[in-house]
């Protein structure tokens, strides 16, 4: 029987990678739904190749353009309330890979419609894990993290209990600026900040790698997903990105999870967890194993890591404020409105402002309150800049 699948964000890098995996194994999968924001040409192309009958495209202009096309018996929807019309019973697997905070609502809503959900959206996990976790439990839906670091922890935990974890190290490549002196950071160009040495990623996440803010987010995610304390988590710089996580257990054992820098591997495994499937990969890289070159993060060069010291183990809006503010600041950098070093400077300034210091003591709320906070943060940042 074919495994029934939905992909939220099918035109992004994660979605495209999953589509490519499925194209090579069509006989075992049936895609029920694809979604996108603006890229109606790509999603229509995907739908025709894989015979998908349901599409959601949320941008109004793109939705209207798609409706004009000759699309046969494909149903076109514009919002995620359409899930109720599309899913008559639970499907087998959902990939949630819509980028940004607007991926939270569909992620929370679709959990009831699937037996398993793989999530590749940092903002959804950081800002809305309390909502996701509630629905996972309510609808008895399995969860798999897709980021290479978190999937590696998930993989290392097979046969172990979370209570047996002593310490986990997430690795960071150091990003595109690892070998550039700190003195040159202020004048870093966009082309330099997005030129990641190991991974092919979108512009936003590449900038987060350059500031190392992505590791702050990944620590927050790991704390939430695996129900850990912040002092159980740390970051090591590992330029080759061959090792993704190191887990030390209370019984003295250490698991080092490594794989080549290819997101196909965690995506493939999230899709085929208990089946004996084979993915074609490179041979073990002995050269990389002989030169792992782990180092502590240089805090003076990557001051964003200091933010981790401000975080408490209890859930608060501070984590949400940080991820939403960083999102806007990176956007302004990509628009050439602020310098590279302004991203961290302005973020640190914002989280110490009275309004947000008071908010940071509160617990995360519902989706609407998170979206409202996102709008408030963007207004405040633009007032600071202009």
Image (cartoon, helix red, strand yellow):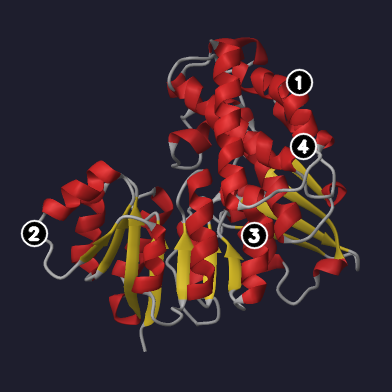
The residue singled out by tag 2 in the image is 70
Q: Tell which circle, 4 or 3, labels the residue nearer the N-terminal end.
A: 3
Cα distance, mark 1 to mark 2? 57 Å
Q: Tell which circle, 1 or 2, labels the residue nearer the N-terminal end.
A: 2
Taking 87 as reference, is 7 above or below it? above
Image quadrant where residue 201 sits: top left
The kind of secondary structure element at disc 2 is loop
At a point 74% along the width and 38% down the height, the residue shown is 318
The residue singled out by tag 3 in the image is 131
Q: Which mark is residue 300?
A: 1
The kind of secondary structure element at disc 4 is loop
Residues under numbered marks 1 and 2 in contact, where contact means CB atoms less than 8 Å apart: no
Q: Tell which circle, 2 or 4, labels the residue nearer the N-terminal end.
A: 2
Q: Position of residue 71 (x, y in %)?
A: 13, 62
Cα distance, mark 4 to mark 1? 25 Å
Q: Nearer the viewer, residue 2 or 155?
A: 2
Pair 1/2: label in front? 2
């Amino acid at each position: 029987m074919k495994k029934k699948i939905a992909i939220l964000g099918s035109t992004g890098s994660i979605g495209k990678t999953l589509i490519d995996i499925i194209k090579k194994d069509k006989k075992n999968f049936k895609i029920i739904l694809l979604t996108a924001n603006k890229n109606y040409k790509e999603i229509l192309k995907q739908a025709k190749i894989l015979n998908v009958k349901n599409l959601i495209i949320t941008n109004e202009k793109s939705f209207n353009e798609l409706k004009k096309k000759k699309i046969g018996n494909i149903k076109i929807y514009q919002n995620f309330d359409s899930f109720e019309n599309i899913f008559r019973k639970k499907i087998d697997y959902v990939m949630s890979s819509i980028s940004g905070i607007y991926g939270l609502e569909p992620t929370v809503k679709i959990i009831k419609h699937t037996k398993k959900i793989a999530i590749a959206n940092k903002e959804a996990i950081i800002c809305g894990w309390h909502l996701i976790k509630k629905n996972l439990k309510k609808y008895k839906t399995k969860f798999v993290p897709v980021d290479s670091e978190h999937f590696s922890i998930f993989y290392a935990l097979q046969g172990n209990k979370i209570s047996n974890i002593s310490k986990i190290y997430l690795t960071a490549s150091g990003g595109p600026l690892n070998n550039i002196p700190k003195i040159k950071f202020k004048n870093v160009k966009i082309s330099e900040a997005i030129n990641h040495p190991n991974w092919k990623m979108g512009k936003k996440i590449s900038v987060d790698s350059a500031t190392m803010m992505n590791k702050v987010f990944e620590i927050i995610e790991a704390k939430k997903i695996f129900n850990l304390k912040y002092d159980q988590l740390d970051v090591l710089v590992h330029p080759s990105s061959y090792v993704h996580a190191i887990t030390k257990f209370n019984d003295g054992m250490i698991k080092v999870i490594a794989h080549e820098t290819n997101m196909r591997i965690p995506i493939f495994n999230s899709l085929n967890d208990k089946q004996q499937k084979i993915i074609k990969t490179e041979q073990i890289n002995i050269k990389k194993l002989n030169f792992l070159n782990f180092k502590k993060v240089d805090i003076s060069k990557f001051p964003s890591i200091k933010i981790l010291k401000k975080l408490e183990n209890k859930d608060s809006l501070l984590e949400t404020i940080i991820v939403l503010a960083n999102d806007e600041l990176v956007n302004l950098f990509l628009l050439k409105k602020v310098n590279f070093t302004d991203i961290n400077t302005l973020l640190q300034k914002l989280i110490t402002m009275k309004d947000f210091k008071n908010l940071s003591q509160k617990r995360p709320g519902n989706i609407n309150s998170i979206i409202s906070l996102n709008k408030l943060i963007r207004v405040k940042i633009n007032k600071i800049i202009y």
